[in-house]
Image: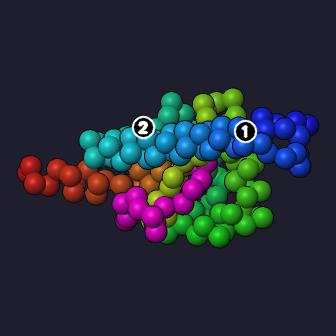
């Protein structure tokens, strides 16, 4: 099978490498824009009042069923998420949304803890469906409301 840069094991030319770098940069820009947009939404509206997709209820119910031990207030364990077993469990969950959510497997940034802002040390690279599942659970639990309250406390 041949990919955008040639068959597996093929040598990468300088022209292709430049193009690949551009693709990576565009990808990074999209991920950061998504992160900034979400943070702006949380500043404008309490997370508990926010709907991220048309099927939040379905995502949340399915997530709670597939990950019954998930505690939205706890700090995410990236090693568990990215272990062989964790990846397989997440893959099964994520793939259910292939035809339901645009860019379901596109990259996204997730805060390890709902108590933290986005920053280098507290952010995990994930895919869009992991972001939706985790953040919908946090929003339903009111764990992101502090962001709105912090932004608007000087106005009250």
For mark 2, what is the residue? 51
Q: Nearer the viewer, residue 38 or 139?
A: 38
Q: Position of residue 24 (x, y in %)?
A: 60, 44
Residue drawn at the location 45% of the way across and 64% of the way down: 120
Indicate how the structure is coloured in the image: rainbow
Please report whichever mark, 2 or 1, sits nearer to the chain's N-terminal start. 1
Label 1 element class: helix
The quadrant in which the N terminus is found is: top right
Q: Nearer the viewer, residue 151 or 149?
A: 151
Q: Position of residue 46 (x, y in %)?
A: 30, 46
Give the Cα separation between the discs numbered 2 and 1: 40 Å
Give the residues drawn in magenta, as a range.
115-130
Q: Residues within 10 Å of mark 1 (few under 14, many from 20)?
A: some
Q: Residues within 10 Å of mark 2 (few under 14, many from 20)?
A: few
Residue drawn at the location 77% of the way across and 64% of the way down: 85
Residue 84 found in image quarter: bottom right
For mark 1, what is the residue? 16
88 left or right of 30 in image: right
Question: Does the segment drawn in magenta span residue 46?
Answer: no
Question: Does the segment drawn in magenta span residue 118?
Answer: yes
């Amino acid at each position: 099978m041949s990919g955008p840069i040639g068959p597996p094991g093929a040598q990468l030319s300088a022209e292709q490498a430049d193009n690949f770098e551009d693709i990576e940069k565009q990808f990074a820009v999209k991920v950061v824009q998504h992160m900034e947009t979400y943070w702006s939404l949380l500043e404008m509206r309490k997370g508990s009042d926010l709907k991220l997709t048309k099927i939040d209820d379905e995502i949340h119910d399915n997530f709670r069923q597939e990950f019954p031990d998930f505690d939205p207030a706890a700090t995410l364990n990236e090693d568990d998420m990215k272990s062989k077993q964790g990846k397989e469990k997440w893959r099964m969950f994520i793939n259910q949304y292939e035809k339901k959510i645009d860019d379901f497997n596109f990259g996204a940034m997730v805060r390890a803890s709902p108590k933290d802002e986005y920053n280098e040390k507290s952010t995990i690279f994930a895919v869009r469906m992991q972001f939706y599942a985790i953040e919908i659970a946090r929003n339903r639990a009111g764990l992101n409301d502090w962001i709105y309250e912090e932004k608007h406390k000087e106005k009250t």
